[in-house]
Amino acid sequence: MMNKYRAETLSWELRDGVIELILHRDPCNEIGSQVLADLESFVVAHDELREQAHALIIASDRKPGFCAGADLRELYHGARAIGFAAAQPQIRQFLRRIHRVMNVIDASPLVTIAAVHGVTFGGGFELALVCDLIIAEKMARFCFPELRLGLIPGFGGIPRLRRDLGNAIVRDLLLTGRSIGATRAQAIGLVSQLTGEGEALRVARLTAAQIGKFDRATSIAAKRFIKPVPYTELEEEIEIFCDLFTKPAVESGLRRFVESTDAQPYLP
Amino acid sequence: MRTIEETTEEILTLASRHFNVARNEISAGDDFFKKLGINSLQALELLTRLENHFGVELPDYEVQGVSDFQTLAERIQSRL
């Protein structure tokens, strides 16, 4: 297995017992079919490299942020071509595939760290939530804008948010669709460490080095104990998402987003 | 407690510094999208910088549709 690989939308490298997965799709790592395929390739590599590693860091080298979420343009045009109702089986298959990726990272024996900056929205927020630790630059911003589109988060967001945070903020974030800054995200227990601008990856590397000092089997046992994967709720989420997807509000919400004349409409 | 005038002045100074526009070229009634030449992503960045600077939380739905510094200052003032 190669210790270093560059796929079309992301790359990974194993160095000193730490795997770094760097997202590099323009403009802001929107998760569409290519990113999904590359993440699936990464999961295969993860399974082969994990015995040589103790930590995994996920970060982005794109300026706008960590990840702006699902590729809504691909989603809209793909569904519109065959009709939103007819697209439901494909949506379910996409969700099952991305859930498999997320679940592998969530349950990884490695200590996983999301090093985030800027936009960390929707599916990007969900990718950060699968990690054991979120280290965020103070300009990072988190949001679940899905209700603005007539949907709920579909990549495991609600079950994992419920696992990690209190009801007040979970409901506020989901039901208002508002974004919160990293300072607030740290105050509510979502972010474990705040860093200056451009420093998240460096701090994540230092954290990974600290974790590497400990007995690996103990870290694995501790993680299993404190971070159960909510598999049943994750399955329920896929069904609710697929049910909502055929409602008229979704097509009109997505059309509004896709046809927006704003240069970068990060909030639908 | 800051006055609304002080809050507005701090917003204008911060915006001028981060978006490289001379302080004397922007005033309270200006449309900040036009004057700063920013898009919605940069508007979010401005929001985060203002939250960090004033130590407040400002939900983005409260500032959606707001495009002038004066109204932005009023929204922040109500959270101070």
Image: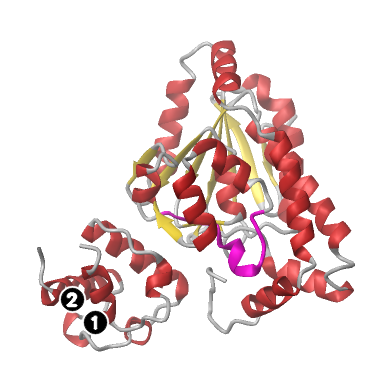
Kindly check if marks 2 and 1 are in contact, taking CB atoms under 8 A apart as contact.
Answer: yes
**At 38% from the left edge and 65% from the top edge, which residue is drawn?**
B45
Q: Chain of mark 2?
A: B
A143 sits left or right of A73 in the view: left
B7 sits left or right of A219 in the view: left
Residue B73 sits in which quadrant?
bottom left
Secondary structure of residue under mark 1? helix
Mark 1: amino acid: Gln
- Vertical arrangement, residue B32 with respect to residue A82, above or below: below
Marks 2 and 1 sit apart, C-alpha to C-alpha, by 6 Å
Residue bearing the label numbered 1:
B70
Q: Chain of mark 1?
A: B
Colour mapping: secondary structure
Query: Is residue B14 magenta-colored?
Result: no
* Quadrant of the rendering where the C terminus of chain B is positioned: bottom left
**At 54% from the left edge and 17% from the top edge, which residue is drawn?**
A222
Q: Relative to the observer, which residue lies in front, A93 or A241?
A: A241
Q: How many marks?
A: 2
Q: Residue B63: x, y in percent? A: 37, 74
Residue bearing the label numbered 2:
B8
Mark 2: amino acid: Thr
Does the rendering let one see residue A38? no
Does the rendering let one see residue A117? yes
**At 73% from the left edge and 56% from the top edge, which residue is drawn?**
A241
Q: Residue A17: x, y in percent? A: 56, 24
Q: Relative to the observer, which residue lies in front, A65 or A236?
A: A236
A75 sits left or right of A163 in the view: right
Magenta region: which residues? A140-153
- Category of crowding for the residue at label 1, using alpha-carbon neighbours closer than 10 angstroms: few (below 14), some (14–19), many (at least 20): many
- Vertical arrangement, residue B40 with respect to residue A25, above or below: below
Residue A207 sits in which quadrant?
top left
Considering only order in the chain, which callout, 1 or 2, is on the residue closer to the N terminus? Answer: 2
